[in-house]
Image (cartoon, grey):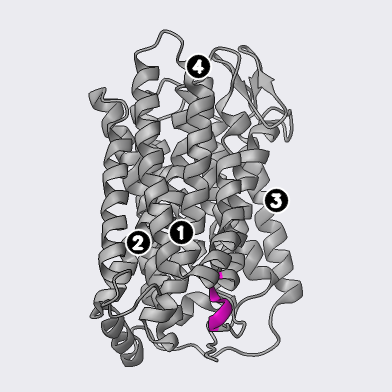
Amino acid sequence: MNTVRTSSTVDKPTAINLIVGMTLWMSLSVLVVQLFTVDAGFSFAQLYRLLAISGLSATIWHFVFFWLGERAMQARFIYLSTAALLLPTIAMIWLLMNPPLSYTALQWLAAACGFGGAQFIAFTRNDKIDQTGLGWTLAVNAGIAGVGIVVAQAAIPFLSSLNLFGATPWFTAHGSGDIVGVIAPGAPLYLANIGWLIVAAIVLATITWQVARPSTTESTPPLGSLTNRTHYRTILRNKHTWLMTLFYLMAFGSFIGFTITFPLSLQTFSATYAPSALTYAWIGPLLGVLARPFGGWLADLFGGAKVTLWCALVLTLSCVVAGVITYQASQSPLPEQWFLGYLLVFLVIFIATGAASSAIFRSVSVVLPFEQLPLTLRWLTAVATAGAAYIPALWYINSTHATPGIALFVFAAFYLLCAVLVSVMYLRNQSEFYNP
């Protein structure tokens, strides 16, 4: 039985840090919809661009943390990075309490919020991981981040409708909604509540860290140590690392990219009163998170490559259907008629991306030396975070050039390519690793 110790920081403070960071980052996916709702003067293309900037920032910070290595996994570093989340949060409150909004300022805010997404790299647990149950174990660990996503997309729209903290009210020009129901045009929205919620969460996280901080003293490894550089070169010279990177970009990259983009894309199907994007958008990421343990269990049972192939084919078909729906809705005088179909197809997409993410983790443990697993998983996570940049960027291009549905057909082609590569590299009898 193979086991490995990953990080020394899997505890309650780490989990809360991750939840807070993801809540801050994903709050932007709600904010852009609400900016459209209150008619803040920004086009869909500009709002997609904000999401792409935030995703690019998160990706860059992920690579910074990846280079820092074990330093980024230490309790003290996690504590400081949690406290640093106050900076973009306070900036958000100040901006939303002082209209009108500057688009330049919003771009800087989007980049700052991306720092919250980088906290995901600390998801690795310090438990001893049994290779035979790896898919399930890592799926449960990674699901912690999903809590922050669901909190952001389910709770924030509701809290924005409440008059709390004396926030400056904005008034809806279009119909909106939250987890409770529909918000009619002309109703007040207190957008600064988004920031106040996250401030409260950060304070809770820092207090929890002070109460539950480790009693032992951690040693600090040197930056860019020879050992780390050797490990980096070892994993990056392996062709299987790059194949798994591509597959994880397909899986988790799509999950995180669609998570941040889906609410705004769903808004294009919304009518004046109902249905509302923010009433339903959070369901997709929730199903994706819940599918991770299921995908891990399937991978442990049938093999990671087979599950990855099934998910890639489901993603291919689903994106083709979603692309057709998007095009048809763009030509219809009543685009809300296509709302339900678009929503249901994307629920399938989220489930497939969640299941595939865990299946790929299972495959990684087979095709690469097990002692390299923690570093490899951080590399995969850093690269796959780019999905939060290129997916909204493609929607931005679609909106700029008025080509509805093209992005989804591009995604479908990418998923089909991944399905072919999985079949050729890992599902032939003469494969170096068969169905890892």
Q: Amino acid at mark 2?
A: Phe
Residue 200's tag is 3
Disc 4 designates what residue? Answer: 336
Report the Cα–Cα distance between label 2 and label 1: 9 Å
Q: Are marks 3 and 2 in contact (CB under 8 Å)?
A: no
Query: Which residue is more in the foreground, 44 or 387?
Result: 387
Q: Are marks 2 and 1 in contact (CB under 8 Å)?
A: yes
Q: Main secondary structure of the magenta part?
A: helix
**Is 138 covered by the magenta stretch?**
no
- Going from the N terminus, do you reach mark 3 or mark 1 first? 3
Residue ID for mark 2: 247
Look at the image and tell me whether residue 427 can be seen.
yes
Instruction: Report the residue that reaches farthest toward the right.
Output: 211
**Residue 240 position (above or below residue 143):** below
Name the residue rendered at 54%, 76% in the picture.
134
Which one is earlier in the sequence, the residue at label 2 or at label 1?
2
Instruction: Mark 3 or mark 2: name the one nearer the start of the chain.
Output: 3
State the extent of the magenta-drawn residues as a range: 131-135
- Under tag 2, what secondary structure? helix
Of labels 4 and 3, the one closer to you:
4
**Residue 189 x %, y %:** 64, 24
| Picture residue at 70% right of the left edge, 78% below the top | 213
The residue identified by callout 1 is 356
